[in-house]
Amino acid sequence: MTGESPKEQRADARRNRERILAVARGVVHEQGTEASLRDIARRAEVGLGTLYRHFPTREALLEALLRQGFDRLAGRAEALGESGEPYEALVEFLRELIGGAGAYRGLAGSMMATISDEQSPLHASCMAMRSAAGRLLERAQAEGRIREDIDGTDLFALANALSWITDQAPSLGSRRDHLFGLVMDGLTRDPE
């Protein structure tokens, strides 16, 4: 992409960028993170040069998809934190996090790498999401529903492990809800 931010681009360029991202989301869901960029451009009805003007590398396209996802999840965590019971809000957020990461083959590994890479362009969005999720965790812990020895790193490691497992062994996809229940059982505080 040129030095322009998406807001500074012409209206037709912004539409092309958004169409590319929308199509890429679906194609990456179907084919994984190694999806054909040529196929994405064809389905978005733009030339390959247009795709590369907006996203010079596969990584740039994946970063844009991830940033949108992280920002959406951060907003969702904030909204859940303002409503509902703390434990249920955390469960709902984790289901969305796992479902989102599991929707794109290869994404769970990218998400974990981003969390620790402060130089990544996605680091700020990832940390905002993680911070919002951390507040959900703290509320559920204050309520006494989640073990006190769990922190945000544990939470994201477990969520990503579950996404990764179903990514690596699609035959386990139908067991995702059961596996999620087991993870939540492990996080839940034993009644005293």
Image (spheres, helix red, strand yellow):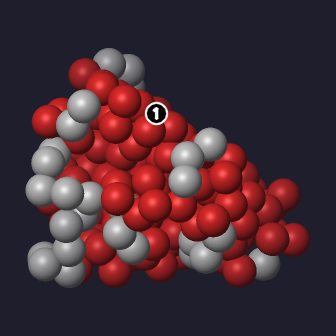
Which quadrant of the structure image shows residue 163? Answer: bottom right
> Helix or strand or loop: what does disc 1 sit on?
helix
Q: Is residue 135 left or right of residue 18?
A: left
- Which of 140 and 29 lies nearest the eye of the viewer? 29
What amino acid type is highlighted by mark number 1?
Answer: Glu
Q: Position of residue 64 (x, y in %)?
A: 35, 55
Mark 1 Cα-neighbour bin, 10 Å: few <14, some 14–19, many ≥20: some
Q: Residue at x 13, y 76 (%)?
A: 118
Residue 148 in view here: no
Q: Is residue 118 left or right of residue 68?
A: left
Count of numbered labels shown in the rendering: 1
> In the rendered view, would you say 34 is above or below 90?
below
> In the rendered view, would you say 73 is above or below 58?
above
Which quadrant of the structure image shows residue 30? Answer: bottom right
Q: Position of residue 151 (x, y in %)?
A: 26, 66
> In the rendered view, would you say 72 is above or below 38?
above
The residue wearing badge 1 is 88
- Residue farthest top in this picture: 83
Q: Is residue 59 left or right of residue 25?
A: left
Which quadrant of the structure image shows residue 149? Answer: bottom left
Q: Quadrant of the N terminus?
A: bottom left
Residue 67 in view here: yes
Q: Residue at x 87, y 71 (%)?
A: 171
Q: Position of residue 47 (x, y in %)?
A: 55, 53
Q: Position of residue 113 (x, y in %)?
A: 34, 80
- Which of 83 and 143 lies nearest the eye of the viewer? 83
